Amino acid sequence: MSTDDIVTRVHAWMDVDPDASSRDELQKLLDEGNIDELTRRFSAPLHFGTAGLRGRVEAGPAGMNRLTVRRATQGVAAWLAAAGPDMVARGVVVGRDARHGSEDFNDEVVAVLLGSGIPVFEMPRPLPTPLVAFAVRALGAGAGIMITASHNPPQDNGYKLYDHQGAQIIPPHDTIVEAAMHVAGEPTLGERGSHLHTLLDDDIAERYITHVSTRYGLATPSDMPIAYTPLHGVGGATATALLARAGFTQVTVTPGQFSPDPSFPTLPFPNPEEPGALDLAIATAVSVGADLVVANDPDADRLGAAVRTRDGSFRALRGDELGCLLGAAALRRGVSGGAVLATTIVSSSMLSVMAHDAGVPFAETLTGFKWISRAGWNAGTTLAFGYEEALGYAVDDAVADKDGMSAAVVLCRLAHELASEGRTLLDLLDELACRFGVHAVGAVTLRFDDPNYLEVIADTMTRLRATPPASLGGLEVTAVDDLASGYRGLPPTEGLRLQLGAHGRVVIRPSGTEPKLKSYLELVSAPTTPGALASERARCDERLARVAEDLTRLLKGA
């Protein structure tokens, strides 16, 4: 694209950008002659996928800004209109977190929807993402929109779209929204004084807390010490109220991390998976004598946890470990009515073995809760429990998405019940490993700073398809499944699955929200005994490290 073309695009954008600060931002780049930066912002707009939009808060079509949000909402309005007058009449639940830009973006969403004649149910303040998913179903709305970038870096924001079932949209709905978004003209904007506007009150959060605490709360209060952190996000007030209502009376909040702060000042990265993210929460646990740390990410749809080990130190639990623990909790409660357990093709296979052993239906899905939440519906029943390894858990079908707050209640209840039996969460993980075999998991992730990272990732996937490895870590690659052609009846998706015989598998796929190429590794052993468990884990971990080393060289083209 020529410089003249870029400059023309910039001026066309500035002519309709409603935000004076964004226009000034672009004018400054023009005045500086920074064509490289303008090319980055205008050559490839944000893509509206099944996770909606997510990107850096900045001016231009490649960024999250008021004009991008305005056009996305026009796309949603067109999508609802195409679905029929009933969906339009049912209205849209609109929520936001406390990130940079969230209030302005929320205002744009409300104004565009009202101007399009669509009723709006607006959350009263920044609140957790699961409450929007819950509200869509509770209010019978036609859709839900949440302004959030979940666990992304502080400079990012995003736009998440739910359908009338309270689940993230799936193809082809995303393409319908994006097509309308790209041809959007000047919208008619409505005002909050419209009869179509309803400002929700605290009743929706109260209904959520009552539902979850009634279903999963303790019969008698527990004095088990728990350390909790919302990681400067919007989950703190709701999660602590929920835990208290569920019967946990000794919850200590990590000082300095309770109030929402979009800069996340005490964190290396606002994701409970990241090293160091739970350090302050663990220090809080040590100070109050707690053996369990629970954490929500900034929009409270994910759950992280750390536990005190037998030597007194703490370690964070992996996403798959939490998934197996919460799956075990579901099986302890009992699964009836044909309800299913579900996880994804990149998560540990242990849940499937646990479900089979218990005689409970199991479903394997593509990555993402847009698929997990539908696992029960696709089977003509409900989802008893579903998870993905990236700390996403669905323990209750009143929320058709991942929910870190209800998952925290279930985990705390499991820890409480085990303590009454003289056991711990780590003891239960050991018992599962002995019974079903060690399931060692790992990941190899390549992050790309190249602005053309999509091309780099595509070239890497093309190379792997053309010349897949014969072995990894000394283990033969016995099968190569191209997920783009479909796998075991699942819809096509970009990725490769490398089977390592009976030893395990590797799944390689591009991230749907970040400039990353991700690989998910799992190696499995036969069932073992308590006395041999430590050595079996060490053997699996050593083999996993060799596979990861070979895979890293392969992905880098070395």
Image (tube, rainbow, N blue to C red):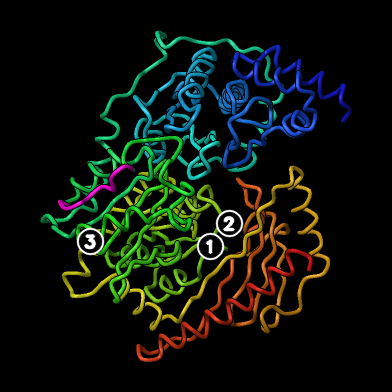
Where residue 187 appears, as percent x and y from the top left, is: 61, 13
Q: Which mark is residue 366?
A: 2
Vertical arrangement, residue 522 with respect to residue 47, above or below: below
The quadrant in which residue 518 appears is: bottom right
The quadrant in which residue 67 appears is: top right
The quadrant in which residue 428 appears is: bottom left
Amino acid, disc 3: Ala
Instruction: Mark 1 or mark 3: name the one nearer the start of the chain.
Output: 3
Amino acid, disc 2: Leu
Q: Which mark is residue 364?
A: 1
Res 457 visible = yes
Q: Which mark is residue 290?
A: 3
| Residue beneath the point at 58% across and 10% down | 188
Which secondary structure, mark 3? loop
* Distance of label 1 from label 3 (alpha carbons): 35 Å
Of 98 and 423, which appears nearest the observer? 98
Q: Which tag is nearer the camera, tag 1 or tag 3?
A: 3
Magenta-tinted stretch: 248-256
